[in-house]
Image (tube, grey):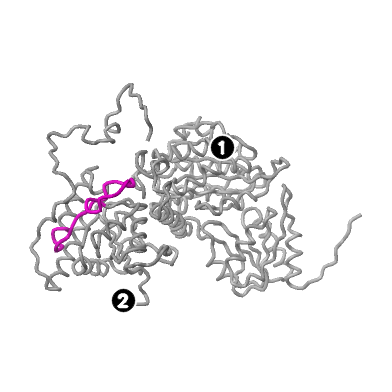
Amino acid sequence: MQEEKKVIVPGPAGYNPQPAAFLGVDLPPPGRALLYGEEVDEEVAMREAAKAMLTRKNPTIFPGPLVLWGWNAAAMEKAKAVLELAMEIPNCRIIPMPDYRPKYPKIDPEAEINPNHPNLTILHNKIEACIFVGVHCHYANLSLRMIRAGTNCFTIALCAEMGHEDAMVSLRDQHAEEIRKFKDVLVQVREELSIKWEPKLPPENPSLPKEDWTKVTPFDFGEYAALLMPRKGEVVEESE
Amino acid sequence: MPEQKVVEPEHLLLEAPRERKFITGSQAFAEAVKRANVDIAIAYPITPQSETMHLVGDLYAQGYLKDYYRAEEEYGAMSAIAGAVRGGVRAFTATSGPGLLRGLEAIVSWPGHRIPAVLGVMTRVVNAPLSIQPDNVELAYLLHSGLIVLHAENQQDVFDFTLAGFPISEKVDVYLPVVVATEGFFVTHAKGYVELPPEDMKLPPRDPYKAPVPPTDCEIPPARIQRDAPVQKSNFMSYLIHAVWQQEIWAANERSRKWIKHFLGGLVEVVNPDAEVFIVASGCAAAQGREAQRYAELEGLNVGLVKVKSLRPFPTQELRDTLKNAKAVIVPEHNIVGWLAKEVKAAIPNSGIVVDGPRVYGGMTLPVELIMEEIYKAFGIKKEKKTLV
C-alpha cells in the first residue's frame, strides 16, 4: 500500500487527533477489512496484522468481557480460539479488559487494561502491537483512539460486529472460526519470516493472585459482594 | 389487532407492497409505531404532540405495545425512556416545543449513554408569549447534541422516517437516538396521502445484545459512569476519556449516513440538479419550496430544489456537489433565527450566494409567493407588486 494512502497509522498522533470516521474512513462491508483506514481484502489485512504481531515489541492480546466471561457456548469457543492464537505468537502476553469501570486510585498496568486509560497499560508494558478482541465496540473505539493518540502501538481489532476505523487493522465478523483462520495466516507469515517458535501458553498474569475456585465465597468479591448477594433488610449507612 | 409476522427492515421499508391511505401526520406516526415492534411508549402530553401519543396509547390498548404510560412531565418521560432502552427494550416517545426544551437535559444525555430510541418532535413555538403554533426554532437546540435528526416534509416522510428510525438507531455502529421532526399542525393535523406497507408485518424485535455497550447491567458504564466516573475528576485522564467519548458519539453519527442512504435513499432529495438557482429547505418548508420550483418551471425559470432530509448528520458533501454551479441558493424556513441558512452557508465554499430567507414564524404559513419573490430577484426579474384595496 502506498504511504500516502495510509490514513490510520501507529501514533503518537497528537494531543487530540481527529477520529478516523471524521477523516473519511468508512467501516467495510462483510468479507472486507480495513488496513490503515483503507478497505482491503480480509487476507491482506490479516497478513499485515500477523506481521505486526510477529515483528513488533511486546505483542499483547487484550481480551474483553465478551471473551473472558463464559456467557454462552460461542463465547467459550471464542476464548479457546484466542488462546490458540496467543500460543502461536512468540512471547505474546494476555492482559485482560475484564470490565469497563475506571480503576482508582491507580490501575495495575501489568494486570489489566481499562478503556478509560488504556494508554497507561500500553506505555507501562512498552507494547508495540496489540489485538483487541471481545471488547464492546464503544469501549474498543475509546481505547483505540487514545492508544493512537498517545502511543506508538500497532492496533488490531478482531471485531464480532462491523469493525473499528481507528485500528490500524480492523477485521469484522470475527468469531471462533474466523480467529482460527487468522491464526493459520499468522503461522504461515511466521514461517515466511523464518521465525522459529513452538506453540506454548502465554505467561501467567503476574499480578493476579492464585485462585482456588473450590474455596471461593461471595466475600472474595470484596465491594462487589453485595451485587452478587443482595441482603434482605440491608441498611446502607454510608454511600460512596 | 391482526397477527403480525416479523420481516426484515429492508422488506418492510423497501420491498413490501404499499397501499395508499389519506391520513394525518399524527396517524402516520402511529402507523409507523404499529409496524415497528415497539415495546414501550412513554410521554407527557403537549399540543400538538398529544394526538400522536393518544393514538399510540390506542395501539397499546389494542395489544401492539407491551407497555405505555403517561409520565409526570417531560424530564421524567425522557429519563424513563433512557432507563427502558438501557433495560433492553425498544421505545418511542414524542414531544413538542416547550416540552422538548423541558426534556432537553435528559434527551441530550441519550447519545452519550448510547440510547437507541425514536423521538418524534412536532414543532411548536417555544418563546414567550405562549403559543401552540408551528415554528421550528426548537430544532436548533437539537443540532449539537449528537442525536440523528431527520426532518419530515409531509405525512409520508413521517411514516417512512419513523419506521426507518428504529433500525438506523439500533445498528451496532450507530446506536444513537433518532429524532423525527415535523411541523406541528401543518403536518401533524393535516391529511395527506401515505403509502403504507401491510399492517400484518412488523420489524424484528430489538436484540439488546447486538450492541456496542453491555445492556441491562446498571453497575457498569454507561449507567455507572454517571455516578462513578473519571469524567467527574479533575485530571488529564478524565478530560481525555470525555474527549474521546464525545468523538465516539459524533463518529457514530457519521456512520449513520450509510444507513440513512440505505433505508431512505439519501440525506437529500434533489429536483432539477442542473438548475441555476436552488431552493434548499427541510421539513414543511420543503413542501412550499417544491411548489415554488414547480411554479418557476412553469414560468421557464431554471430552478432546482434540494430537500434536506437529514439535519444530523448534515449532507455537507451532497450540498457542495449539487450547489457547485448555482448562482443563488434560497433557504426558506419556519423560524426567525435561520438555522438552516447558517448550516448551508457553513457547508459550501461560496456562502455569499445564500439568500437568508424567506422566513416565517410564530405559526405563520409560508406562502409560495414569498419564495417566488426571491427567485425573481435571483434572476433579476422585476415584478410589479399589486395592491389590493
Q: Chain of mark 1?
A: B
- Separation of residues labelled 2 and 1 (CA atoms): 53 Å
Q: Position of residue A118 (x, y in %)?
A: 31, 55
Which quadrant of the view contains residue A209?
top left
From the image, tell me which residue sits under label 2: A1
| Rendered position, A172 above or below A104 | below
Q: Amino acid at mark 2?
A: Met
Name the residue rendered at 61%, 37% in the picture: B51
Q: Position of residue B368 (x, y in %)?
A: 73, 58
Is B52 positioned to the left or the right of B207 in the image?
right
Name the residue rendered at 15%, 68% in the picture: A188
Q: Chain of mark 2?
A: A
- The residue furthest top is A233
From the image, tell me which residue sits under label 1: B74
| Rendered position, B69 above or below A158 | above
Q: The residue tagged with tag 1: helix, strand or loop? A: helix
Name the residue rendered at 66%, 58% in the picture: B338
- The residue furthest left is A198
Q: Amino acid at mark 1?
A: Glu
Which residues are the magenta region? A85-112
Q: Position of residue A113 (x, y in %)?
A: 27, 52
- Using the image, tell me which numbered label, if any, was put on residue B290: none
Q: The residue tagged with tag 2: helix, strand or loop? A: loop
